[in-house]
Structure formats: structure tokens, C-alpha cells
Image: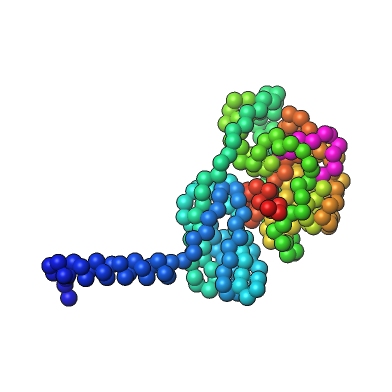
Amino acid sequence: MAFGGAAGRAAGWLLLCWLSALATVGRAAEWQAVQGGVVALSHPAVVAGVRVFGRSWPVHARAGGTVAWVGVDLARKPGDYPVRWSDGSTERLRVRQGRFSTSFIEVPRSMAEFDAKKLARIRHDQALLRAAARRPVARSFSFRFAFRPVEGVVSTPFGARRFVNGRPRAPHSGIDIAAPRGTPVRLPADGVVLLAAPMYLSGNTVVVGHGEGVVEIFAHLDRVAVHAGERLHRGASVGTVGATGRATGPHLHWGVRFRGARVTPDALLPR
Ligand SMILES: [Zn+2]
């Protein structure tokens, strides 16, 4: 059947309206997130899993439905991404551009330009950090930190576009909190120490796993109070604030990786 003339055009237009109304009614939910954020997605049924950005994310059953947590890496390209629930339903996650500042620091040349030997050391450190972050931790995590590990002024915010001695560097993957040397660094949630080691750039570094792929990084510590494998409760001291590694003054670099995504630690604090 073909539509012809004015009546046909009107019928066609009505059909179009009806179809677009159906599309609106049946449209999947659209979730919003920002670069470097953690977004909680809910599903009305109890489902076993969800995939976003080509990987799976933790799900918890809640009041007959499901809540899933998804980490959006700070460099994730803004745009729409499919959310695939394990029951076959699909929704959409819209990632918006984060608002990040720009930071300029000046350090001695030896801390900005690296010869082959230093570069090898830095790559070795990075491999250790990556391996630690991937180590499985058999705990269920509630996706909540109780507090920031130290109180102080944020000297470099999360996501800052950094220039070291005038040269562009990777965006800042944590929050720098300035505090006097020796200030205790308190763990904001129960966890397991995955790594406690000196690193060239991040100085004395502690990595703690909380379960569900959430890993916390504390860098530039003066003293380290824990060792790998130790189980810690919320509030435990992991060490003290210092200026070890590449640091212009005493501060804590506080970072979180969630299943590989660099997210802002503040996303896990109570709102
Ligand atoms: Zn930092």
C-alpha cells in the first residue's frame, strides 16, 4: 500500500507520530556521568552483571533490583556508550567532559628529564603499580569512603592538565592535599595492602585494595606504617605525609583506580 495525495501524507504523518511516541515510551533509560566520575546505575530486576566500556562492573542486589557501579576514566572520550545488562537489556550512558584546571610546576631538571636508566626505573615502578592494582581482593566494598585520608588544602585538583617545567604531562590522576610533614594518613575504608614500596616519582607509595576492583594509592609518604599483605580497618594509619619522590613540598597524593579507570577519590565520599 502506498500513500498518495494530502490524505495519504496526513496518514503518513500520523503513523510517524505514533511510531515516535512508541519510541519515546519504549526508550531505554539514559544515564549521565562525567570524566573521572563513578556512576551508580540501577536496574529494576536482579541481574548477574553489566558491561560498559567493554568490561564488567560490580553489581549488588538491592530491594528486588540491582545497583551497578561504573568508573569513567578521566580521559574517556565524551559521548554515548552502551550499557549491556546480563538479562539482555541495553541502556545508554552519556559521558560528559570534566571541568579540569591547569597546573604548572617547576622541579629540578633531574626530576623532569630522565636518562635511560631513570626511565627504566620509572617503567619498572609503573609495572609494579599496575600488577598491584590488578591483584584480586576477596572483599565486598560498599563504594563509600568515610573521610579524606588527611585534612588540608587541595594543592593540585584531580584531572588537572599538568605542565612540568613548561612541558605538558599526563593529567593528574589523584588529589594532592597539602599538610605538614608527619601528619598521619588514615585509611578511609577497610582494605588490604597490595604494595608498600619506594618509587622514583611517587616516592614512598602504598596501594590498598578495597575489593570489587577499587584500589587506593597514597604517594609521597614520609614514613610508611604498613607492609604488603596486611589487612587494615578504616581509620588505620598507612604512614605520614611527606615529600618523597617528585614533590615540591609535603603533601599527600591520593588516587583511586576502579577496575583500571582513574577516578576522583572524592566520588566515593558521602555527598
Ligand atoms: Zn599528585
Q: Give the quarter the ligand 1 occupies.
A: top right
Q: Position of residue 153 (x, y in %)?
A: 74, 36
Q: Is residue 220 above or below residue 236?
A: above
Q: Position of residue 62 (x, y in %)?
A: 65, 71
Q: Is residue 103 above or below residue 22?
A: above
State the residue in front, 8 or 75: 8
Q: Residue at 28% of width from left, 67% of height from top?
A: 16
Q: How is the image coloured?
A: rainbow
Q: Position of residue 2 (x, y in %)?
A: 16, 72
Can see residue 228? no
In the picture provided, is 108 more to the left or to the right than 180?
left
Can see residue 69? yes
Residue 258, quarter of the rendered image: bottom right
Q: Residue at 65% of width from left, 73% of height from top?
A: 63
Q: Is residue 13 magenta?
A: no
Q: Position of residue 231 (x, y in %)?
A: 83, 57
The total of numbered circles placed on residues is 0
Q: Is residue 223 above or below residue 256?
A: above
In the picture provided, is 28 more to the left or to the right than 168?
left
In the picture provided, is 254 more to the left or to the right than 32?
right
Q: Residue at 50% of width from left, 72% of height from top?
A: 88
Numbered range of the magenta stretch = 176-185
Placement of the N terminus among the 4 image quadrants: bottom left
State the residue in front, 213 or 197: 213
Q: Residue at 72% of width from left, 44% of height from top?
A: 254
